[in-house]
Amino acid sequence: PAEPTPCEKYLQLYQSGHLQVRRSDSSHWELKCTICPKWIKTSVPSRRPLSIPNHFSVLEGHIRSRTCTAYPARASTAPPIPSPRKASPFMAKYGRSSSLPLEASSAQSAPVPMVIVQTCPGSPVDWPVQVGSFTETFPFHRIGAQPGSLSFDVEMHNRGTKIVGFSKQCTGEAQLNSCCPQCTKIPAEVQKLADLALQADSRINHRYLS
């Protein structure tokens, strides 16, 4: 198999709980550099989950740039600490390695406590109208603030095998391994739309039902 890219490795670190993230004041995700103590701001809104390698490209760019203060440069001002072994290349670059020998691992300082934020996964949408595709029969034009619009503001994401909805008021945080309180309202609203679609007159062209 092909070697994972740095961004793919950062995604794996995040998904395994070994990469710190937090929300900035502007409601975007920030990533903790694995080399220096800086927090790197991303363009990903905090109401969206960090789910693809490209979300970590800004972290890769930071680590490759001169703005990232490498560990050896910071350590030069402190008394040297003898180490029985040289850290692996993965540890030097990405901050963690599960293949280090036991004696090398024990010589390292204790890990800094991390704040793990579980992001809202959105709400799966069950759209039972079978006479046309989801994009043909779902009333997207009724999403908004106009009179007669849907009672919720939502974004639909096609994940290939399923449709996932995110409320425009999504808080970005999951609750009890589920979506946020705003996104939990989506299934009931979608069911109302589906009932109206299924009850439509048989002479209606369902491709234009919305």
Image: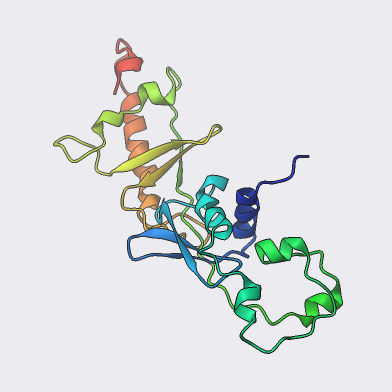
Left/right of residue 50 with respect to residue 74 in the rendered view: left
Q: Which is more toward the observer, 160 or 123?
A: 160
Q: Residue furthest bottom?
A: 79
Q: Residue furthest left?
A: 147
Quadrant of residue 125 within the rendered picture = top left
Number of callouts: 0
- Residue 209 position (above or below residue 121): above
- Residue 142 position (above or below residue 69): above
Where's residue 14, x and y in %?
A: 59, 59
Quadrant of image for the N terminus: top right
Where's residue 61, x and y in %?
A: 53, 53
Residue ID at (86%, 71%) = 101
Where's residue 133, x and y in %?
A: 44, 21
Q: Which is more toward the observer, 34 or 142?
A: 34
Quadrant of image for the C terminus: top left
Left/right of residue 100 with respect to residue 95 in the rendered view: right
Left/right of residue 66 with respect to residue 137 in the rendered view: right
- Residue 7 position (above or below residue 136): below
Residue ID at (38%, 50%) = 183
Residue 198 in view:
no
Quadrant of residue 113 within the rendered picture = bottom right
Residue 26 in view:
yes
Where's residue 105, x and y in %?
A: 79, 76
Quadrant of residue 198 within the rendered picture = top left
Q: Which is more toward the observer, 38 or 127?
A: 38
Residue ID at (42%, 18%) = 132
